[in-house]
Image (cartoon, rainbow, N blue to C red):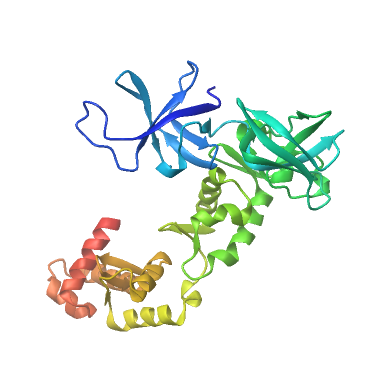
Amino acid sequence: MTGFLRITSVQKSSGRPGSGKKSSRKDLLVTLSHGGAEPTRGRWIHLQSLQSFRLGRPFFSGGTQLFPVRGLSRRNLKAGDGILPADCPQICSRVFFGTVENLQLPYSCDLSFDKQTLPARFLHADGDGPASVRLELLQPAALFPGKPLIVGGGRFTPLTVFPWNDAEFENDPFLLQGWMPLKAVTAPAAVPVAAEGGFLFLESYLERVRKLLLPATRGEGGLDRRKISPLINIPPYVADDVISILQSRNWFSLQEGKILDSNWDYSRSLSPMNRGLLKQMEEEGYLIEKIIDSPRGRGLSILCGSGLAVEIEEGVFMQTALIEKISSSVDELRMSNPDISLGELARVTGIKKRYLIALLQYRDTVL
């Protein structure tokens, strides 16, 4: 299996030679030092940012092998950065919790990781659980949970990147943390678990995450998905798999980059201004706003992100409940009279013909 690799150069993509097509502006090309072990396509972890990304099919240009990178911005990538396969058995972080033997705390030293040396310090962690020692590194590194590191005259055993600190779990990294890479753990018998991507999660951990997210996701507009990582103390490269599980259970939904509680009425979370917009939309049937960066435009964007409204065409917004009502009426009218005209449909449903057409066109694109 391909392990740790280092990026040796980064450049913008202008399309593959001979393809006749230009790549997306977001596509980047990197060269890698891989020592002959061909890197595999698929999901990887960018060690410096702890973000996940996709490595595309390599190709040669001017005798150099280039790898497309998708899912990372140019400002996050630079020569010298390290990457790891997303299914690696290590856990990646700048902070680890674990246990020490024969080491007087606090303690500072330099530790070597993947041909680089990082300043590190060992401190007493908060709480009195099993993972009672905190390792802080200058930059993120990848460590094997449960595998000791020789430090000075003693050793440090990394267990988690964020512990539950429950003494009943003793020194089991998976039970302490609530999740682990699939290749790093064997699920204990009779312990409910769930797998997603390259990770295994405790059911009790997922329930805990759900409770943590409920207040934040019920705020106006929901929770920005980028905030889930610090909120539940999980590395960004694991967060996408957590979100996938939460969605699959219909606990939460993801709309326009926002995490929403699937069972919450977001009209209860609106500010007075946005509540007024929703009411106006309900009374008038639609609202028109071409300046998206205006206060009204931002309010309409919040309504759309919360699932309370829909932009049926550029600058034209309708209440979601009204769309469902009109759509149901149109379907019933067409079923009873297949030859009914658009003008008659507009008269019966009470919406202007021009916006009824826009609504029906929008509905055709999403169904």
Quadrant location, the C terminus: bottom left
Task: Tell me how many marks there are.
Answer: 0
Would you identify the image quadrant in which residue 94 lies?
Answer: top right
Residue 301 found in image quarter: bottom left
Residue in the picture at 47% in, 78% down: 271
Q: Observer-nearest residue: 308 or 249?
A: 308
Residue 339 vertical placement versus 349 (above, below): above
On the rendered structure, is 75 left or right of 50? left
Image quarter where the N terminus lies is: top right
From this view, report whether residue 223 is shown above or below residue 319: above
Quick check: 227 left or right of 127? Answer: left
Asked whether, in this view, residue 157 is left or right of residue 205, the answer is: right
**Residue placed most toward the observer, 14 or 191:** 14
Q: Looking at the image, which residue is at 50% across and 75% down? A: 269
Percent of width and height locating residue 189: 73, 37
Using the rendered image of the protein, determine whether residue 308 is visible from the camera's viewpoint.
Answer: no
Residue 31's x, y, as percent? 41, 26
> Is residue 138 visible from the viewing direction of this image?
yes
Q: Residue at x 64, y 40 (%)?
A: 138
Image coords of residue 36 (percent x, y): 47, 15
Outermost residue, top side:
36
